[in-house]
Amino acid sequence: MSINLNVPNISNKPVDKCVTKLNAEDVNLFYGRFQALRKITLDIPSCAITAIIGPSGCGKSSLLRLFDRMNDLIPGVKVEGNIELDGIPIYAPKIDVVELRKRVGMVFQKPNPFPMSIYENVAFGPKRHGIKNRGEMDEIVEKSLRQAALWDEVKDKLGQSGLALSGGQQQRLCIARVLAVEPEVILMDEPCSALDPVATLKIEDLMQKLSEDYTIIIVTHNMQQAARVSDTAAFMMMEPDRAGVLVEYGPTAQLFTNPKDKRTEDYITGRFG
Amino acid sequence: METRTAFHNRLREIQDDILAVGSMVSKAIARSVEALKNRDLELAEQVVEDDKKINQKRFEIEEKCVELIATQQPMASDLRIILAVLNIISEVERIGDYAEGIAKIAIMIGSEPPLKPLIDIPRMAEQTESMLRRSLDAFVNRDAKAARKISAEDDVVDHLYDQVFRELLTFMAEDPKTITRATRLVWVAHNLERAADRVTNICERVVFVVTGKMEEIGASKY
C-alpha cells in the first residue's frame, strides 16, 4: 500500500520533500515451514514516523527486522518478494549487510547499553567504522548525545558506566549509539515498553525531533503511543494459519478517527484483539 | 522540561485558529451593520459570502480537535482546552451566522428609505464585537476574572436592545406604514442581542478551562 502524506500530521512536518525511503513488495517471510508474513506491500515515507500496530504474534517485529536483515540470523528463515532502500533491493546477493545496518539502525525493547562507559558506548560504532581521531570522536559523541537529548544529563560523567544510568537514560544512550553511525533509518522495536510514563513521553518527544532528519519506524503494542507519536500507521493481524498480513495503512489521524477497514475499527476500539 | 512539544504546539495552533475565526466574525458584525447603515448592498453580499469561509474554518478546527482527542489522549487542562475549543468554535460560528442574518436583512431592506438614522444598533454591534474579541483573549490568556466581567457586560447590550425596541414601537404605533421597516430593524437588534448572549457562553467556557467547573455566569435577561 502506498501512501499520500499530504495530510496534517502531529508534528506538522513539511511533506513536500517526502519520498519513499523503504518499500516492501509482495513480501512473504517463512520461519522453516511456518509462514510469518504474507504478501506484505507497503511504502515507508522518508519524512515520517511510521508505526506498526497489531495484536501479539501478528508479525510486527518480524516485518521490522526485515528492514535491516536482522531475520537473517534466525536459522531456517526464507524471504520472498522485494524490499528496497532508496530503490536498491536489500536482499540482493551483493548487498553488504554491515553497510546496510549502518544505514538502518535498530533500537530494542530493553535498553541494552554495552558494559562500558557512556563515551565508549556511543563511540563503539564509529570506531568500528574506522574513526580513529580523538577530536573527531569527541565531536561525534557530543553531537549524538545532544541529538538524543541526553548530553546535559551526562556531560559531566562520560567516563561512568552506561549501566549506571536510569532506564530512560539508558534507552536514550542506545538511541545516541545508533545516531553515532549516522544512519538514515531508525527502527524501534517497543522502545518504551520497559520505561515509565515520563521517560516514555521523553522518548516520544525525541522521536518527533529526530523524524525531521531520519526515517523512523516503530513497532509498538501500545496503540495510544502509536496514535500520539506517528504520522503514518500500519495495522497488521493474523490470518487463521497465523501468518501476519497488513490490513490497513494510512495517515495516523485517519486510522484512529475513521479507519477504512472494519477489522481496524474493531481492534482500535477494543472489540477484539 | 516540556515533554510533549509537538502536541502542545498543535494545541496552541488550534487556539490561534480560534482567534483568527474570532476576528473574521468580529469583522462580519461590524461590516453587516455598516452595510445596513450605509445601504451598501455590495458590502452586505460580501458578508454573506465570507460566512462560508467562517463555516469552513469551524469544520477545520473541529477536525483538528477530533484528531487530537483520538491520537493524543489529552488529560486535565489539555482536555478542558480541547473541549472548550469545540464549544467556543460553535458559538463563534453562530455569531457569524447572526452577522450574516443582519447582512441579509440589509439586502432585504435594499434601497427603501431609512426609517431613522441608526444610533443604538451600531452601539449594540460595537459592544458585542468588543465583548467577542475580549472573551477570546480571555480564553487564550486563561483569564477567568476577565471572562466574568465581560459576561456581565451583556446587560449593556440588553439595555440597548430594550431601548431600540421601545423606540421602534413608537414609530409603529404612530404610523402603521412603518411596521415592515421597523420590524426588520427589530430583527437586527435581536440578532445582536443573541450574539452577545453567545459571548457569555464563551465566557462560561473560559471559566471552565481555568477552574474545571461548569457554571452559568450572568444569566441573560432574554
Image (cartoon, coloured by chain):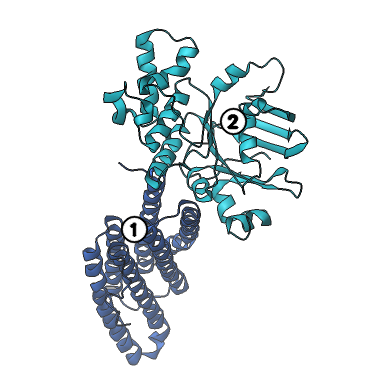
What secondary structure is marked by label 1? Answer: helix
What secondary structure is marked by label 2? Answer: loop
Left/right placement of residue A113 relative to residue B162 reads: right
Question: Which of A174 and B183 lies nearest the eye of the viewer?
Answer: A174
Quadrant housing residue A268: bottom right
Quarter placement of the C terminus of chain A: bottom right
Chain letter, colour blue: B
Q: CA distance from mark 1 to mark 2?
A: 38 Å
Q: Residue furthest top?
A: A133
Where residue A76 appears, x then y in whole percent?
A: 73, 28
Quarter placement of the N terminus of chain A: top right
**Above or below, A22 relative to A4:** above
In the rendered structure, the colour chosen for chain A is cyan
Where residue A256 appears, x then y in whole percent?
A: 56, 53
At horizontal 39% and vertical 21% (from top left) the residue drawn is A116
Quadrant housing residue A75: top right
Check disc 2 and report the residue beneath it.
A19
Q: Residues within 10 Å of mark 1 (few under 14, many from 20)?
A: some
Amino acid type, label 1:
Ser
Check disc 1 and report the residue beneath it.
B77
Amino acid type, label 2:
Val
